[in-house]
Structures are given as structure tokens and as C-alpha cells.
Image (cartoon, rainbow, N blue to C red):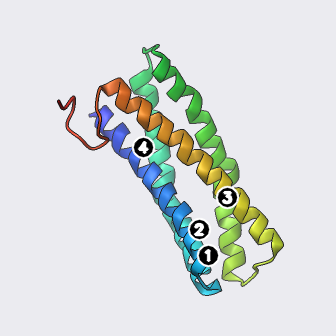
């Protein structure tokens, strides 16, 4: 059961961050200031999903990997603090700041500098989480994230 919770939480975190990232890029390229503000608000509200998903992934991963010393497990353990710190120190404050600015119509150069930082940090977390998902699939012998356990 812990494995399924870990898998679900990790994939939820990855997909939510990917949705935030793609929504931001799309609205910045094709949206109005009003639609940018709407996306920024949605990202702040979506943190109520992604933060627990990342925490759950970290806790279940720690439990599952407690006595394992494989290279892939060690890689997952090394990545998790970077994922958490990137989210805590860059992504969450950036999202709150950008939502505040957008809701007040402040789209100056500082807004776009923080937007660039947020996109870069988000891409980094997608790479790190994606690498951990890949390694988890290799460890389990599974080829599909939502597939049957050890499917042939």
C-alpha cells in the first residue's frame, strides 16, 4: 500500500507542477493580464494539492527506502531535499508574490524577473521529480507509472 501511495503522490506532484508550468507559459504567451492573474491565483490555490503530494512522496519514500542501499534509491534520496527546498524557498514565495502582483495589476520588470525564476525552478523540479519517477519505475520493474505491478 505504501508503494501505491508513494507512486500516486509523486505522479500527482509531477503532473500538478507540469500543469502550473505549462499554464504559466501559455498564458504569458497568449493571455491577457486578467487571464495571467487568474492563472496566478489558480497556482496559489493549487499549492493545497502539490505541497501535501510532495510531503507524502517524501515521507513514503523515506519509509520505503529506509533499509535499501541500491544506487537508484540513493539517487532518489539525494534529490528529495533539493525538490523540497526548491519548492519551499523559491516556488512557494514566487507563486504568492506573482499572485499578489497580478491581482493588483503590477506587471513590471520585477514581476517578469520573478516569473523567469519561478519557471526555471519549476523546470528543475520537473526534471528532479521525473528522474525520481524514472528510477522508481526501474526499481519496481514497472514500465508504466499507473500500470500493473510487475506487468509482463
The answer to whether residue 14 is left or right of residue 84 is: left
* Count of numbered labels shown in the rendering: 4
x and y percentages locating residue 58 in the rendered image: 48, 36
- Rounded to the nearest angstrom, the CA distance separating label 2 from label 4 is 23 Å
The residue under label 3 is: 118
Crowd tier of the residue under label 2, counting other residues whose Cα lies within 10 Å: few below 14, some 14–19, many 20 or above: some
N-terminal of the two: label 4 or label 3? 4
Query: Which disc, if any, is residue 25?
Result: 2
- Horizontal arrangement in the rendering, residue 79 relative to residue 106 (left or right): left
Mark 3 crowd level (few <14, some 14–19, many ≥20, 10 Å Cα): many
Tell me which label, 2 or 4, sits earlier in the chain.
4
Which residue was labeled with disc 1? 29
Q: Which residue is rendered at x = 19% and y = 32% of the image?
A: 151
The residue singled out by tag 4 in the image is 10
Query: Are the residues flagged by discs 2 and 1 in contact, CB closer than 8 Å?
Result: yes
| Label 3 residue SS | helix
Say whether marks 1 and 4 touch (CB < 8 Å).
no
Tell me the element at label 2: helix
Judge depth for marks 1 and 4 and give the one in front: 1
Tell me whether circle 1 and circle 3 mark residues in contact (CB < 8 Å). no
Amino acid at each position: 500500500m505504501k508503494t501505491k501511495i508513494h507512486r500516486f503522490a509523486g505522479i500527482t506532484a509531477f503532473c500538478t507542477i507540469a500543469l502550473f508550468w505549462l499554464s504559466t507559459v501559455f498564458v504569458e504567451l497568449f493571455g491577457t493580464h486578467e487571464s495571467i492573474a487568474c492563472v496566478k491565483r489558480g497556482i496559489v490555490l493549487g499549492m493545497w494539492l502539490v505541497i501535501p503530494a510532495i510531503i507524502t512522496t517524501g515521507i513514503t519514500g523515506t519509509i520505503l527506502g529506509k533499509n535499501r542501499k541500491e544506487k537508484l534509491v540513493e539517487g532518489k534520496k539525494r534529490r528529495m531535499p533539493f525538490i523540497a527546498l526548491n519548492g519551499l524557498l523559491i516556488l512557494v514565495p514566487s507563486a504568492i508574490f506573482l499572485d499578489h502582483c497580478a491581482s493588483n495589476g503590477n506587471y513590471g520588470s520585477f514581476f517578469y524577473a520573478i516569473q523567469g525564476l519561478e519557471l526555471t525552478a519549476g523546470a528543475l523540479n520537473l526534471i528532479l521529480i521525473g528522474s525520481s519517477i524514472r528510477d522508481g519505475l526501474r526499481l519496481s520493474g514497472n514500465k508504466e507509472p499507473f500500470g500493473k505491478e510487475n506487468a509482463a
